[in-house]
């Protein structure tokens, strides 16, 4: 559960929060776990190393935010704007990121295992060494994304756009690349053989 005093500071606005975070609270690990901040305007907020596990940020604006090394495990960020955000080293495992925009975001070394990235925009995102094992990425836009050294083992990439993506030394064992049409045809074929 979130520390109410931390939430009260954040509700005063990004400028107040960033001033507090960069000043007297430099050694504090903010706890905003399980907060409900859907549709919040948090453009440029400093949430480095913040506990945001289980938080709800549906359709929130977190563009250009610093979320590096934050704990966003099991958070709900469906439809959120994280364009240009820094999520390097962040833990997003099991998070709902469906329809979220990560265009040009920094996700180097981020943990996205088992995350739901259905129809997410990861175009031009920086994901080297990211862990996307078992992630759900159907119809995701990964065009021109840097996935060098990333782990996509067991990920569902059905219908994902990987045009221009950097896949150097990327782990793809067990990844699924079927389009929805191919997947439907495969299911139909299975039913006919039974």
Image (cartoon, rainbow, N blue to C red):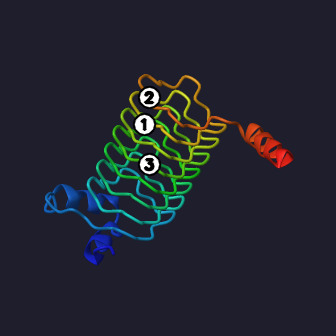
**3 to the left or right of 178:** left
Q: Where does label 3 land, which residue?
A: 113
Taking the spot 36% from the left edge, 45% from the top edge, the residue there is: 87
190, 36: nearer the viewer? 190
Percent coordinates x, y for residue 133 in the rendering: 46, 43
Nearer the N terminus, badge 1 or badge 3? 3
Q: Where does label 1 land, which residue?
A: 151
For residue 34, above or below residue 22 = below
95, 133: nearer the viewer? 133
Percent coordinates x, y for residue 85 in the rendering: 39, 44
Q: Of the numbered discs in the image, which one, if any, rests on residue 170?
A: 2
For residue 38, above or below residue 144 = below
Label 1 crowd bin: few (<14), some (14–19), many (20+), radius 10 Å: many
Q: CA distance from mark 1 to mark 3?
A: 9 Å
Circles 1 and 2: CB atoms closer than 8 Å: yes
Label 2 crowd bin: few (<14), some (14–19), many (20+), radius 10 Å: some
For residue 144, above or below residue 9 = above
């Amino acid at each position: 559960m979130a520390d109410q005093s931390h939430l009260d500071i954040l509700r005063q606005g990004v400028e107040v929060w960033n001033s507090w975070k960069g000043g007297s609270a430099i050694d504090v690990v903010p706890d905003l776990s399980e907060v409900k901040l859907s549709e919040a305007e948090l453009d440029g907020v400093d949430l480095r190393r913040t506990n945001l596990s289980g938080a709800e940020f549906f359709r929130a604006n977190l563009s250009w935010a610093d979320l590096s090394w934050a704990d966003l495990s099991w958070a709900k960020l469906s439809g959120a704007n994280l364009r240009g955000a820094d999520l390097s080293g962040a833990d997003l495992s099991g998070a709902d990121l469906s329809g979220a925009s990560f265009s040009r975001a920094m996700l180097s070394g981020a943990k996205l295992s088992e995350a739901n990235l259905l129809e997410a925009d990861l175009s031009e995102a920086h994901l080297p060494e990211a862990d996307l094992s078992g992630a759900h990425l159907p119809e995701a836009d990964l065009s021109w994304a840097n996935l060098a050294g990333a782990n996509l083992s067991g990920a569902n990439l059905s219908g994902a756009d990987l045009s221009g993506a950097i896949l150097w030394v990327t782990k793809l064992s067990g990844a699924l690349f079927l389009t929805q049409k191919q997947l439907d045809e495969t299911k139909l074929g299975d039913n006919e053989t039974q």
